[in-house]
Amino acid sequence: MKEKVRFLGLDVHADTIAVAVAEANGEVRSLGTIPNRAESIRKLVKKLGGVEHLRACYEAGPTGYVLYWQLSELGVQCDVVAPTLVPVKAGDRVKTDRRDAEKLARNHRSGDLTAVWVPDAGSEALRDLVRAREAAKQDQLRARHRLSKFLLRTGQRPGHGVKAWTQGYLVWVRQLCYAQPAQTATLLDYLHEVEHMGERVGRLEQAITEAVKLASPQMQAVVRDLQALRGIAEISAVTIASELGRISRFESARQLMGYSGTVPGEDSSGKRMRRGPITKTGNAHLRRIVVEAALELPAAASRWAGVTQAPAGGSARN
């Protein structure tokens, strides 16, 4: 049966897919380009014969895992491979869709490709929601910067004891008046954007809370257990759980840290050992949230000490 296995290399784009096939012990040839549509993929699989003899692969990219799920529904075994780990020949600088598809098929047949973990539909949906909230937080930060820099340029300062971005601070901003109508219009626009971003973040965080309630029991257990760690609240726990997916797929803590890029870089030779800053080559979303949680540890430890060391009969502050 092994000699009948055919290896498909798929170079996937938004509208087209370049297809190549490598026979188990034969040539590697191009099958042309098909539209990136479910019906075209179904016709291709039907044309190539029994799905039990097909092994497909394509590079992870902006098109996501839709093609993987489509092929899986058709019964085709498919791997989504890490593009940075695809072998490259020295001096090979000619890059076309056809050549890329043929290279994928050839390397897939020889076992030189590294497959990435593919989340299920529920995990992927939760991760999209978490990343949408992260993008909203970044937009909120930019909106706040624009407003604060405008106030700084126009010489506006809040009263003593008014902390930035508190309710009192926003009340103060709303009461500001400028002699120039243009500046008043600018202030209102910046203020409206800050308020809009705050509402957007609030909606997404509420959506995350509701989504966790509908998640699988395994995902809920991970989110709940992560919150037992100091410095990690619900949003941080959901972010870590959604970005990691199935944690059991990591064989060791070193492998998990490598996935997040939080291991030190190393430039060693012979007896000389030199280690530098973290590599930052892993999942940036996961790395950001764990670094923020680590920075929160001193404050969390202080709050925890206030709880555990409260006097008898007194109330501890949370």
Image (cartoon, rainbow, N blue to C red):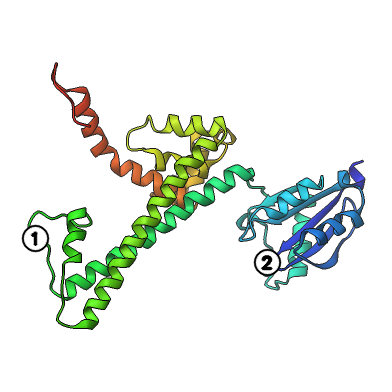
* Disc 2 target residue: 14
Counting from the top left corner in percent of width and height, residue 273 is at 41, 46
Counting from the top left corner in percent of width and height, residue 221 is at 50, 29
Figure quadrant of the C terminus: top left
Counting from the top left corner in percent of width and height, residue 70 is at 75, 51
Q: In this view, which residue lies farthest toward the left?
A: 160
Q: Secondary structure at mark 1?
A: loop
| Residue shown at 55% from the left, 30% from the top | 217
The residue lying toward the viewer, choosing from 252 and 212, is 212
Say left or right for 49 vs 263.
right
* Disc 1 target residue: 159
Amino acid type, mark 1: Gly
Position of 83 relative to 249 (above/below): below
Q: Secondary structure at mark 2?
A: loop
| Residue shown at 73% from the left, 63% from the top | 11
Badge 1 local density, few (<14 within 10 Å), some, or many (20+)?
Answer: few
Say which label, 1 or 2, has the lower sequence index.
2
Position of 16 relative to 277 (above/below): below
Position of 301 relative to 157 (above/below): above
Q: Nearer the viewer, mark 1 or mark 2?
A: 1
Q: In this view, which residue lies farthest toward the top?
A: 312
Counting from the top left corner in percent of width and height, residue 237 is at 43, 39
The residue lying toward the viewer, choosing from 111 and 129, is 129
Badge 2 local density, few (<14 within 10 Å), some, or many (20+)?
Answer: few
Q: Are marks 1 and 2 in contact (CB under 8 Å)?
A: no
Say left or right for 153 vs 22.
left
